[in-house]
Amino acid sequence: MIKFIFVRHGQTEWNLIHKLQGSLDSPLTPMGINQALKLHEKLKKDSTNFSYIYSSPLGRAYHTAQLITNNLSNIRTIPEFQELNLGKMEGMDYQTFEATHPIEYFDFFYQPEKYNPSALNGESFTDLLLRIKKGIDYLLSVHKDGDTVIVVTHGITLRGIGSYLSSKSLSLENFSKYPVPENTSITTATYLNGHFNILDFSNIEHLN
């Protein structure tokens, strides 16, 4: 069995003011740093012996990975788990997005199977799932039974991970079943005999 621990990055400055980030970046807030340090303490308390840690190449995820491992581990970047590219929406606040692109706004949040980002020059949810599949296939090709793997990634990407692992398909049917996880939340899944099992999604007990 391979154990996967997927982590969302800590709170960022743009999270705080409700700006869409996507492939752009903003630094962790003091709270985001504290969230990551609390997760580090949880992993240490639980004696979580991880074999490898991967991170999206975006700074907010990589900084989180550094904090939760106390800079002791060799962090490998994996672009397949980068956040969804939001095109023209990046850097835009939620209210402006809704006012200027009401159809795309509604579909983005409530009807992912209908979301069409072509007018925004963004990435579709299907494109995201294809990326996730590629990333998961890579991890399965380089890891073996007994490994525990941490992947630090992003909110929308984690929705896609939940959707893909639960269905093992590129269907968007399950996408809306998974909310955007909380900052530094843990999503745990196992892989055994060709099947994934999601044990926990968006666990934030370490923040309580």
Image (cartoon, rainbow, N blue to C red):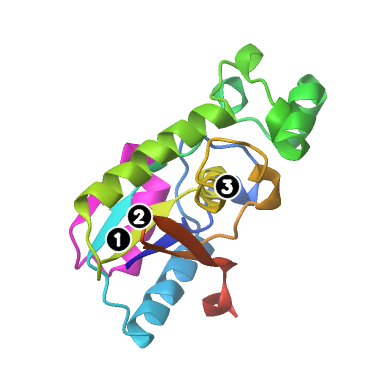
Mark 3, secondary structure of its residue: helix
Q: Position of residue 112 (x, y in %)?
A: 69, 34
Real-space Cα distance between discs 1 and 3? 27 Å
In front of the other: label 2 or label 3? 3
Q: Residue furthest front?
A: 193
Viewport quadrant of the N terminus: bottom left
- The residue nearer to you, when weighing 118 against 112, is 112
Q: Marks 1 and 2, Cα distance to the nearest angstrom?
A: 5 Å
Q: Which residue position is annotated with label 3?
A: 163
CB atoms at circles 2 and 3 under 8 Å apart? no
Does residue 70 belong to the magenta stretch? yes
Q: Are marks 1 and 2 in contact (CB under 8 Å)?
A: yes
Residue 66 tag number: 1
The boundaries of the magenta stretch are 56-80
Q: Which of marks 3 and 1 precedes in the sequence?
A: 1
The answer to if 187 sits in the magenta stretch is no
Looking at the image, is 154 positioned above or below residue 74? above
Residue placed most toward the observer, 26 or 174: 174
Q: Position of residue 67 (x, y in %)?
A: 34, 65
- 143 left or right, relative to 188: left
